[in-house]
Image: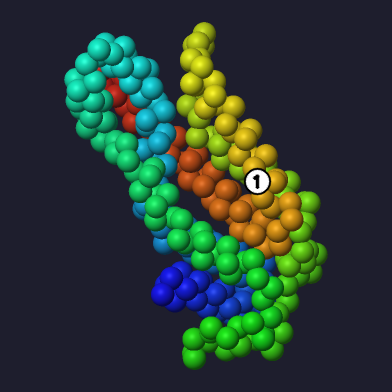
Amino acid sequence: MLQAIFYTPFLNALIVFYNTIAFHDLGVAIILLTLAIRIAFMPLFYKGARNQTLIQKLQPDIKKIQHQHKDDKEKQAQAMMELYRQHNVNPFSGFLMLLVQLPVLIGLYRVFLQKITPESLTLLYSFVAVPQQINATFLHLLNLQNPSILMVILAAAAQYVQGRLALPKLEKGQELSTADQMTRQMIFIGPVITVVILGTLPSAIGLYWVVTSVFTAGQQIYINKTINIKEEEKVHGLA
């Protein structure tokens, strides 16, 4: 059941891209499939990332509420929900986004993890042509069925940039709490985990990881820009 929902459609989409606009380059097909999925889920990803960014920016207000109502958890929760309501923030969006992404990620990893050959394509739909051979070399330079240190480094770098962009800017002279310091240190843990995970896996997965991280970083830049513009408009409106 799960295979029919999450694995087979991705495999067929990959081969359709490979047979058509990817010009029989598996790497290009992976890039196109990744972009297609990110665009299809963009409203969900955008809303989740925007909520997480706003929650980061609301941390001073959140800490103030926690301090004011430290002896009354019920009032603290009510004040927090009111703060989220005022800023149109859903604190549970990150969890929901992860819940939706997980089956998709599992399906994609299964597609990219296997060595794709004409003989392995038994789950193609009847209207999808089976390629006579699979060119697993990306741009005639990189064999995507083998691990690649270059792809691992690119994926780790993209992961770092993505995490860096998600952090709120520090105000001059701002002191960080222990929790804030740990949050900022997490941006280094992500790339390390990326290296550990991708080090022995086919570079096809690394390519997917790079494209996803770059796309997410671009989306985060746009989110940061729009939020900053709205904040400036509020300031000018009050002036």
Q: Nearer the viewer, residue 234 or 152?
A: 152
Position of residue 33 measured from the top left corner of the image (x, y, whole percent) = 54, 67
Dot 1 amino acid type: Thr
Left or right position of 227 against 238: right
Point 58% across, 63% down: residue: 109
Position of residue 233 measured from the top left corner of the image (x, y, whole percent) = 32, 27
Position of residue 150 measured from the top left corner of the image (x, y, whole percent) = 77, 51
Classify 174 as above or below 26: above
Tally of numbered discs: 1
Left or right position of 23 against 2: right
**Furthest residue in direction bottom, as rendered:** 126
Q: Quadrant of residue 27?
A: bottom right
Position of residue 68 measured from the top left corner of the image (x, y, whole percent) = 26, 11
Point 73% across, 51% down: residue: 199
Q: Could you classify mark 1 by the number of other residues whose Cα lies within 10 Å: few (under 14), some (14-19), or many (20 or more)?
A: some
Point 41% across, 75% down: residue: 1
Classify 169 as above or below 149: above
**Furthest residue in direction top, as rendered:** 173
Classify 176 as above or below 229: above
Residue 226 visible in the current orientation: no
Scheme of colours in the image: rainbow
Q: Nearer the viewer, residue 227 or 107?
A: 107
Point 50% across, 71% down: residue: 7
Disc 1 is placed on an element classified as: helix
Residue 56 visible in the current orientation: yes
Instruction: Report which residue position mark 1 lands on.
Output: 194
